[in-house]
Amino acid sequence: MTTSSPTNENPGASSSSSSSSSSVDVETLRRDRILSSKLYFDVPLRMVPLIYSSSYDIAFLCIEKLHPFDSSKWGRICQFLIKDGVLERSRIVEPLEASNDDLLVVHSESYLSSLKSSYKVAIIIEVPPVALLPNCLVQQKVLYPFCKQVWGTILAAKLAKERGWAINVGRVWGNIYHLLPQILSANVCMVMIIDLDAHQGNGHEMDFGNDSRVYILDMYNPDIYPFDFKARTYIDQSVQVQSGTPTQVYLEELDKALEAITMMTEGPKIAYYVLTEAGASQCKFLVAGNNFNPELVVYNAGTDILDGDPLGQLKVSPNGVASRDEKVFRFAKKKNIPLVMLTSGGYMKSSAKVIADSLMNLSVKRLIDLASPPLGT
Ligand SMILES: [Zn+2]
């Protein structure tokens, strides 16, 4: 759900792209757009690779109340960190605004045109009353914050490559996964998506179904939306955690999953299949071989796994979320793979504090450094 593409559009492609020469033209045009983009600006070392913009937060005419989502979550996470003295506001990185050319890297012209219809936007964001609003308002108050978050993720990927880690305090939305490997194609060939949001990540699974550059570990609740059985066949490593799965079982399943990846990339070349049933949890590994060595981990750290979340339906405690995040960071650090963390979905007011506490835990364990050098360096 949180990683779903709005449509099955073919970004950057035109209707005349059926011939190989026009395909090359489309690729060349896309590459030129990427190379001339201002979005991937150099961030001074004194800034912390934590990305946020106040425009991430959606709040107008109370539409934020029409979706089960704490739309001011992102700002509150930063406020907790600033209040506790672990982060200085002036060190937070703000993404730039995407130009039309930037958007055309990810989306087709016809798709962008379709967003001039408030009705279409209402369908995409699952808030029907938005269909009744003037499109200029929708563009400014709904699409703009979403776009900023997506571009924040792209900048985070660049920063992670430079600093070893980066966090976008925002939500995954749109065709981010279309863009990531292309943006980084100059120095990243393989990407590992670790999707620990409670929902199955059917968007990126459909996008990368047969793309050998992308390895997908998805740990999700099969009892909730989106029930996308076709997309499930594209998951490289599927770990199903059913409704009611408690913290300990959840973390054990995660340990097994990360261990399987380690075996895959470090052990002898072997394809294996493991099926375990432990209480409410069922775990399935499909491992292809040992020749996958990712150069970037994209970690979807949704907090809708929290006990009490109305959509996630799992029973993981706040400390369990911190342990989960720590395990993923330790995994990436041990393997020396840059990691981009996306704070992503989570539908309770308590989520912001849980995320802030988890980031503080990562900082205490020296897996991230939110302090950074003194100003002026
Ligand atoms: Zn979710």
Image (cartoon, grey):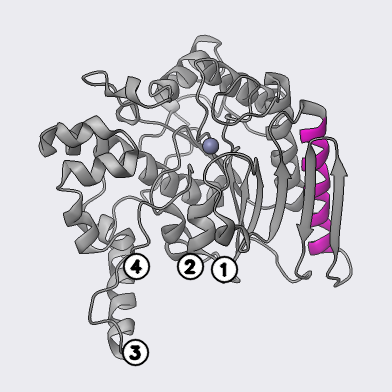
In whole angstroms, how far apart are the C-alphas of marks 1 and 4?
21 Å
Q: Which residues are magenta?
A: 249-266
Q: Which of the two marks, 2 or 3, is nearer to us in this view? A: 3
Residue, disc 4: 10
The three-letter code of the residue at mark 2 reads Ser
Identified at 71% across, 57% down, the residue is: 237
Residue 253 within the magenta-colored segment of the rendering: yes
Q: Which of the two marks, 4 or 3, is nearer to us in this view? A: 4
Give the mark, 1 or 3, whose residue is nearer the N terminus: 3
x%, y% of residue 139? 18, 39
Regarding mark 2 in the picture, which secondary structure is present there? loop
Crowding at mark 4 (Cα within 10 Å: few <14, some 14-19, many 20+): some
In whole angstroms, how far apart are the C-alphas of marks 1 and 3?
23 Å
Crowding at mark 1 (Cα within 10 Å: few <14, some 14-19, many 20+): some
Depicted 334 relative to depicted 167: above or below: below
x%, y% of residue 163? 57, 45
In whole angstroms, how far apart are the C-alphas of marks 4 and 2?
18 Å
